[in-house]
């Protein structure tokens, strides 16, 4: 795309400015490539509308990401203060969800230390599997499923093992 892509909108969308604009009846040719099974919408919008929608999207994503990171730090502090492993698993689950959130949404590109995460979709999927496994571990420990529901624990272990095997 070269010089025409400015990078000012968030990485969730590719925005190209049409120098002469688009009039009724004009023909615009686009070639869109996406991974199989990943449908994309293509439309032409005024730049002001794109910018407004982008600001709303970025605001909500920032709030969600900040909330996940804050809760992860709080859970880590509780683990250090109380010493219960459940809080450590909660911190891992929340941090891995924040990592997946940042890698899949493009926020990881903002910092050079995490930019490598979102360059390859396989790494994004691995962060998602890490979040899934951490959440299964936290839920099992927090709800004491091994003592209360051993069959559910077995099902969760089989699901976690199959997710780990499929991720590799």
Image (spheres, rainbow, N blue to C red):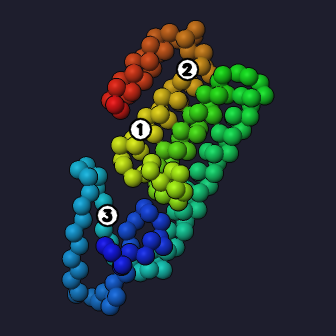
Circle 3 Cα neighbour tier, 10 Å, few/some/many (<14 / 14–19 / ≥20): few
Residue that appears at 41% across and 45% down: 124
The residue that disc 3 covers is: 41
Q: Position of residue 58 (x, y in %)?
A: 54, 62
Residue at 46% across, 76% down: 49
The Cα–Cα distance between marks 2 and 3, rounded to whole angstroms, is 39 Å
The residue identified by callout 1 is 126
Q: Position of residue 147 (x, y in %)?
A: 58, 8
Q: Quadrant of the N terminus?
A: bottom left
Comparing 69 with 27, the one in front is 69
Mark number, residue 140: 2
Location of residue 89 by image quarter: top right
Taking 25 as reference, is 162 left or right? right
In this rendering, the answer to whether 27 lies above or below 111 is below
In the image, which disc is placed on residue 11? none
Q: Please identify the quadrant where the C terminus is shown.
A: top left
> Can the viewer see residue 70?
yes
Which of the marked residues, 1 or 2, is nearer the chain's N terminus? 1
Q: CB atoms at circles 1 and 2 under 8 Å apart? A: no
| Side of 103 relative to 85 (left or right) | left
Lower sequence index among marks 3 and 1: 3
**Residue 45 vertical placement versus 101 (above, below):** below
């Amino acid at each position: 795309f070269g010089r025409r892509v400015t990078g000012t909108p968030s990485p969730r969308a590719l925005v190209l400015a049409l120098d002469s604009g688009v009039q009724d009846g004009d023909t615009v040719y686009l070639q869109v490539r996406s991974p199989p099974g990943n449908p994309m919408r293509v439309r032409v919008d005024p730049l002001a509308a794109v910018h407004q929608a982008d600001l709303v999207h970025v605001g909500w994503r920032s709030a969600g990401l900040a909330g996940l990171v804050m809760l992860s730090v709080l859970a880590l502090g509780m683990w250090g203060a109380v010493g219960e492993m459940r809080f450590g698993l909660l911190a891992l689950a929340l941090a891995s969800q924040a990592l997946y959130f940042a890698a899949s949404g493009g926020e990881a590109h903002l910092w050079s230390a995490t930019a490598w995460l979102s360059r390859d979709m396989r790494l994004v999927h691995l962060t998602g599997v890490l979040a899934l496994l951490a959440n299964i571990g936290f839920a099992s420990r927090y709800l004491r499923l091994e003592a209360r529901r051993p069959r559910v624990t077995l099902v969760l272990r089989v699901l976690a093992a199959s997710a780990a095997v499929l991720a590799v």
